Image (cartoon, rainbow, N blue to C red):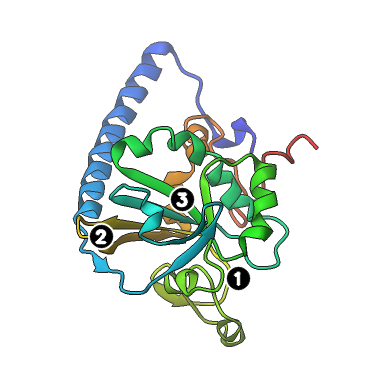
Amino acid sequence: MKLAEKETEVVSPAEWLVARKDLLTREKEFTRQRDALSAARRKLPMVKVEKDYHFEGSDGSESLADLFDGRSQLIVYHFMFGPGWEEGCKSCSYLADLFDGANWHLPHRDVTLVAVSRAPLSEFAPYKKRMGCRFKWVSSYGSDFNFDYHVSFTEEEEKQNKAYYNFQTQEFIHDELPGLSVFFKDDNGDVFHTYSAYARGLDILAGTYNFLDLVPKGRDEDPDDTMSWVRRHDVYNR
């Protein structure tokens, strides 16, 4: 998209300031709305996790409670990497590039962030090394975790061309899809599911988008295939 196609005006500094202040009013209202939405999200009811999930990571087998690593809040990013895949999803990789930076700070707010994939650990460990990921990344292979949190789908669902994703039944898209789930552990060690998000609900994780939204051309994406431009970070300069 060329800048001229946006029909952007060229004005005097005084005229620009008027337009900028008008936009600032709208930005402040958006910030207030976002704060209110975040407050409502924190007030969502919780569901106790009754199933005994286990994961395989570099520290061996761990339960869901173990993944909290001594904290009370856990964010799980459902990273698209299915059994037999040679590479992780490029869009998930795009989001995950920011996880290590966040992990400098999240533990100091009582939050643990981990990635979970359905592929066996041995299959995605080389990819993790290739991408230079330092964040904890574990496998849910052999458990119902990915299916219960609606990010992995069965062959039967594919045959029926129906899958439950993003809180609705829709046409089958893929056997693995992205998502995020949040859990809380109380003083008794009980674990509760508090939140999940999928599809565009994950935009908030894409810090690069926040930068792109500030520039004149914006995200400049193909509206029919929005993330077709994204590459794994070690591919751009090939």
Q: Mark 3: which amino acid?
A: Val
**Number of other residues with Cα within 10 Å of mark 3, as a class: few under 14, some 14 to 19, many 20 or more:** some
Q: Are marks 3 and 1 in contact (CB under 8 Å)?
A: no
Residue 40 x, y percent position in the rendering = 21, 53
Residue at the limit of the structure toward the top, as seen here? 13
Q: CA distance from mark 3 to mark 1?
A: 23 Å
Classify the position of the C terminus by image quarter: top right
Instruction: Name the N-terminal-most of marks 3 and 1.
Output: 3
Residue 65, horizontal then vertical, whole percent: 35, 59
- The mark found on residue 189 in the picture is 2
Circle 1: residue type? His
In this rendering, position of residue 147 left or right of residue 132: left
Residue 57 on image: x %, y %: 54, 56
- The kind of secondary structure element at disc 1 is loop
Q: Residue 36: tell me if it is visible.
A: yes
Q: Which residue is mark 1?
A: 174
* C-alpha gap between disc 3 and disc 2: 19 Å
Neighbour tally class for label 2: few under 14, some 14-19, many 20 plus, Cα within 10 Å: few
Q: Is residue 124 left or right of residue 37?
A: right
Instruction: From the top left corner, tell me how far across and down residue 13 is, in percent.
Output: 41, 12
Residue at 53% x, 45% y is 95
Distance from Cα at disc 1 to Cα at disc 2: 35 Å
Asked if 218 appears above or below 170 in the picture, the reply is: above
**Label 1 packing within 10 angstroms: few (<14), some (14-19), many (20+):** some
Check disc 3 and report its element: helix, strand or loop. strand
| Residue hosting label 3 | 114
The front one of 84 and 92 is: 84
Check contact, mark 3 vs mark 2: CB within 8 A. no
Labelled pair 1, 2 in contact (Cβ < 8 Å) = no
Q: Which residue is depicted at the point 31% across and 33% down?
A: 27
Image quarter where the N terminus lies is top right
**Vertical position of residue 31 compared to residue 203: above or below:** above
